[in-house]
Image (cartoon, rainbow, N blue to C red):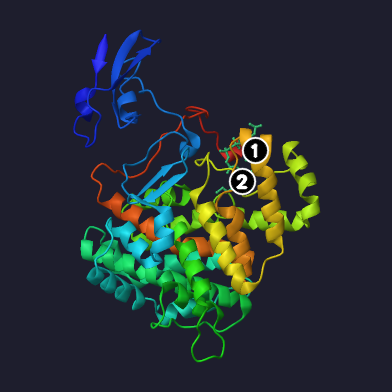
Amino acid sequence: MTDSTATASTQNAGATSGETLTVRDNRTGQEYDVPILDGAVKAADLGKIRTAEDAPGLAVYDPGFVNTASCRSSVTFIDGDKGILEYRGYPIEQLAEKSSYLEVAYLLIHGELPTKDQYDTWAHEITYHTFVHENVRNFMEGFRYDAHPMGMLLASVGALSTFYPESRNISDADNRHMQIVRLIAKMPTLGAWAFRHAQGKPYVYPDNDLGYAANFLAMLFKMSEPKFSADERLVRALEVLFILHADHEQNASTNAVRSVGSTQVDPYSAVTAGIGALYGPLHGGANEAVLRMLRRIGSVEKVPEFIEGVKNGKERLMGFGHRVYKNHDPRATIIKKACDDVFEVTGVNPLLKIAVELEKIALEDEYFVKRRLYPNVDFYSGLIYEALQFPPEMFTVLFAIPRTSGWLAQWLELVQDPEQKIARPKQIYTGHRTRDFVPAAERWR
Ligand SMILES: CC(C)(COP(=O)(O)OP(=O)(O)OC[C@H]1O[C@@H](n2cnc3c(N)ncnc32)[C@H](O)[C@@H]1OP(=O)(O)O)[C@@H](O)C(=O)NCCC(=O)NCCS
């Protein structure tokens, strides 16, 4: 018997008409035709496969969402095999070379590149919302002297929701826009203040004459000079790093933003969830691990010995390999060029020589070639951040600031998508059932 579920799915836009998967349930002998839409089957369609009317439907078990699509998205496209990354259809290489971070943020949020007027309005809005309420400053000053800057950022972005209670009205488009502007504008201020706090230096207020990255550098490094002006090459390198980190489709932190956002909470709280996910070493911490590895290797002469250790399974070559990119990470190529620009100003980081030698050997070695292991974005970003005088604890903050535009583009898509529901996965229950409770007085006798 064939149970056709096609009608349940025909309303999906972009559906590949007529493609189906025939599933035979060997428990019952029944066959089902499950529609395939855009290369995917709906988990809810599989849920119709059951052994009896009142039995639970077939579920999909997928810890880590390794092969589960949680949404339809038109923000970012990745082809890991071909090494392609595109924001709204524009290749990352072109954006990194020709665009600015604010223009890319506009593109991610609005879906199209801005006209001159649209860009001017956007840049003006972002620039004039960089200040935060003085109480946020007082609040940040209350952290311990050695507080991790990412923990400070996480807490202060969460606290912003209390300053803008109207942000809970997520069904109003103007209101959403206002909060998006505020978040993109205030992240560098909060990130810079978290950095200054750890150094015991006074917080620096935003300078509205400066662009996004230049203003961030001023808030980080300004001391007694009346006007801080960073080297243009450093400003551009930071812009490029910001562009490269702006979005990366459904990664762990974006999934956290979407998951929390699906409860219809305000965007500050949703973005705070993303910052929490990015704080984890498996997500935002790999570039710090690269630096530790390079320091441990210590010199170019020791590289072959280290590579042998990797091949024997004693070591892992940090900054190599990627879950999605199996050919090359397009961001790594761009970042390598940014490295050269930064070192022209700051002087060459001595660890660079070790990194270059590692890359050279690894790219020729059969072990890495066979496993399709290539440098990823983190292989070089730590070196740049260090050259810019950032301590390793700041690396994830430097990731969170530009990723905010991506998180918000995805959040915006989520809250306007009629197919989305509150994120609530199923479980496969493995515990006891229906036991009689014995009161403590009897159990402990
Ligand atoms: C990113 C990463 C977690 C992806 O992992 P993955 O897609 O699950 O790949 P696997 O761990 O299954 O690796 C496949 C094979 O390559 C090897 N491998 C993967 N990354 C490796 C690395 N960085 N160094 C040495 N060997 C590596 C694995 O040991 C495995 O070998 P095997 O087939 O002999 O068992 C992994 O490549 C890694 O740990 N890289 C270093 C950390 C890093 O740079 N992370 C930042 C990512 S942006």
Amino acid type of the residue tagged 2 in the rendering: Phe
Element on which disc 2 rests: loop
Mark 1, residues whose alpha carbon is within 10 Å: few (<14), some, or many (≥20)? some
* The residue at label 2 has a CB less than 8 Å from ligand 1: yes
Q: Is residue 47 visible?
A: no
x 32%, y 10%: residue: 30
Quadrant in the rendering for residue 440? top right
Mark 2, residues whose alpha carbon is within 10 Å: few (<14), some, or many (≥20)? many
x 26%, y 12%: residue: 2
* Residue 323 coordinates in the image, percent (x, y): 53, 40
* The residue at label 1 has a CB less than 8 Å from ligand 1: yes
Quadrant in the rendering for residue 176? bottom left
* Residue 39 coordinates in the image, percent (x, y): 34, 30
Question: Looking at the image, do the residues carrying marks 1 and 2 touch, with CB atoms under 8 Å apart?
Answer: yes
Residue behind mark 1: 368
Disc 1 from disc 2: Cα separation: 9 Å
